Amino acid sequence: MDTLFRNSRRKLSQGLIFWREVGEGTPVIFLHGAWNDSSQWISVMKSLSQDFHCFSLDLLGFGESENPNIHHSIDLQVECLSEFLQAVKLEKVYLVGHSLGGWVAASYALKYSEKVDGVVLLAPEGVEIQGQEEYCRKMRRLLNYPPLVVKLLRSLSPLTKILGWYEKIAQDLQLRQELSPYPIACQLLFKRKQAEIEAELLQKRLYMIEVPVFILQGSQDTPDALAKSRVYAQLTPKVELKMIAHAANDLPESCAEVVAVDIREFIKGN
């Protein structure tokens, strides 16, 4: 029998929020990654719907949620999540966040610990690692290229091949094209002022997380992703880190059954 999802929308103070919902019981909130929307959790939610009441939101500015003309921040996403949970009358929940969603989930748990039973983080963003500031500057430059510069670089491909620059330029332009459908993720991760991004990073506050935290990390993910999960694991008090062998950066899709089993065991054990 097909799992019946309910799609809903609710107007919050900052904009319209879209979410998918399925199941009954203990409420579990799923927050998607930077380059995704709520649909990335469908397979995981199908597996968990017999045990839990699952909600998967499109974060503000993503997917079918509204993208208001305001300054986006992690704290804004946290407040939207808080307002959403009040609107649907959920007093205490489990949070599951991937990548950017993990950053939002951990930030929410820090600010509203009394409303959280536990947190599952999959390859979370939101902590500082070596070389990150330089990487952010590079991404900011790449994403801020005017269209004329992009067109010029593409037109100069015969010259860049001769100079040995073609492959690197082609990779950068391909990455820029892949990230362009996610302007709010680009803004949150790269395009804000560096001081503002750093003010929302969590490494100096993780010791204050009071709820149990379970981290899932693909062993074949990027070195940066592995480093960030280790920072979370080293600095968070009630934490367990599990490495998933042979998995990369798309755990909710490529390892949905494994992820669902691990989430179920974590919630049942708390």
Image (cartoon, rainbow, N blue to C red):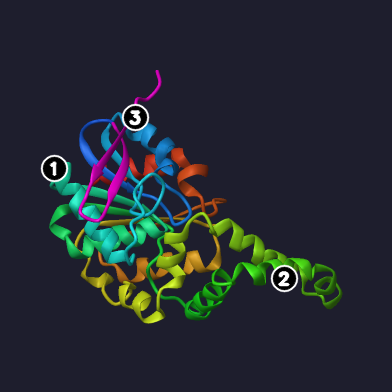
Which residue shows up at 29% across the image and 77% down it? 204
Question: 75 or 257, which is in the foreground?
Answer: 75
User: At label 3, which amino acid type do we have?
Assistant: Phe
Question: 27 or 15, which is in the foreground?
Answer: 15
Instruction: Measure the C-alpha gap from mark 3 to mark 2.
Output: 47 Å
Name, please, the residue furthest toward the top: 1
* Whether residue 220 can be seen here: no
Q: Which residues are magenta?
A: 1-22
**Horizontal arrangement in the rendering, residue 107 relative to residue 156 (left or right):** left
Checking the image for residue 5, the label placed there is 3
Bin the neighbour count of mark 3 within 10 Å (Cα to Cα): few under 14, some 14-19, many 20 and up: some
Contact, mark 1 vs mark 3 (Cβ under 8 Å)? no
Mark 3 or mark 2, earlier in chain? 3
Mark 3 or 2: in front is 2
Quadrant, the N terminus? top left
Any magenta on residue 6?
A: yes
